[in-house]
Amino acid sequence: MIYTVTFNPSLDYFVTVDDFKLGRTNRTMTESMMPGGKGINVSAVLHNLGIATTALGFIAGFTGEEIRRKAMEMGFGCEFIDVEHGYSRINMKLKDYDGTEINGKGPDISTETLDRLLLRLDHLKEGDGLVLAGSIPGSIPASIYRDIMERLQGRGILFVVDATGDLLMNVLEYHPFLIKPNHHELGEIFGVELRSREDVVPYAGKLQEKGARNVLVSMSGQGAVLAAEDGQVYMLPAPEGRLINAVGAGDSMVAGFLAGWMQQKDYGHAFRLGVAAGSATAFSDLLATREDIQRVYDKIGD
């Protein structure tokens, strides 16, 4: 079972607006709503690829109930913990303006509520996977990813961390199975600008030296790079296709990689499926289906 943790889930409200203008009343042309947050996205795509998964996290208020309802409709397991006060956030995504969004804050998480999650994680067993993804609310200690990995060390759990800055760097000593920075985030860690796949390789290797077992670097239109635990370096250009929606593409790449690894225990296959899943979501209105991913996978050269 692959478990994902999303500390601050959202309802993602996707809208298209014809000729959006500041300071004016703008009316939507199309709109849709789905549960959001990096861990939830990973669980959704894992489920689409036939991998058993359960999403964990915190929800609050009527928006939290809608997150739970929509997640259950999507078919994957969810064990969200209810927060007594506040509301889960709503994030507005303007699809006509790629990368333009307004993200809510979300509820405060008390120490007692956080402890409920930690006790649930104590039940994970050998062979399970745990995906820690995304930012954390200000009410949760900044060391939480590190604290969780320290707490669960020695149990044979595959840890995946998709985060930035100290959230990422502070877990490397616990040897996560997979980390997935993008090339901008990787460059920021080392104070360099990375423009090509070849540029990425030595810096991915530096993160392995610090403890990461596998480093998967997404590069948008430049493709992706995997520095694998077996010493191999894999590179792929971005598959051809029309960008429709970049939201969730990186999360889909994580899900595809994990699904590929669970299927064949082969890094080449896992990398190829990860790239296919990330690209298929970028080419789709919402998160990619199994059929979407397979079509892209079949077009990617070995």
Image (cartoon, rainbow, N blue to C red):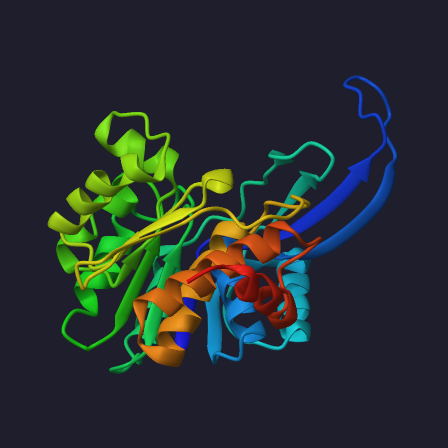
Name the image quarter holding residue 271: bottom left
Residue displayed at 21% across by 52% down: 171
Farthest residue in the front direction? Answer: 301
90 horizontally vs 31: left or right: left
In percent of width and height, residue 71 lies at 62, 69
Question: If the image is split into quadrants, where does the N terminus sit?
Answer: bottom left
Residue displayed at 27% across by 46% down: 168
* Residue placed most toward the observer, 102 or 51: 51
Q: Is residue 261 visible?
A: yes
Q: Is residue 150 above or below residue 233?
A: below
* Residue placed most toward the observer, 204 or 85: 204
Name the image quarter holding residue 112: bottom left
In percent of width and height, residue 188 lies at 30, 30
Residue displayed at 16% across by 59% down: 174
Farthest residue in the top direction? Answer: 23
116 horizontally vs 64: left or right: left
Q: Is residue 155 above or below residue 86?
A: below
Q: Is residue 117 visible?
A: no
Q: Is residue 109 above or below residue 259?
A: above
Question: If the image is split into quadrants, where does the C terminus sit?
Answer: bottom left
In percent of width and height, residue 235 lies at 35, 50
28 horizontally vs 74: left or right: right
Residue displayed at 29% across by 59% down: 178
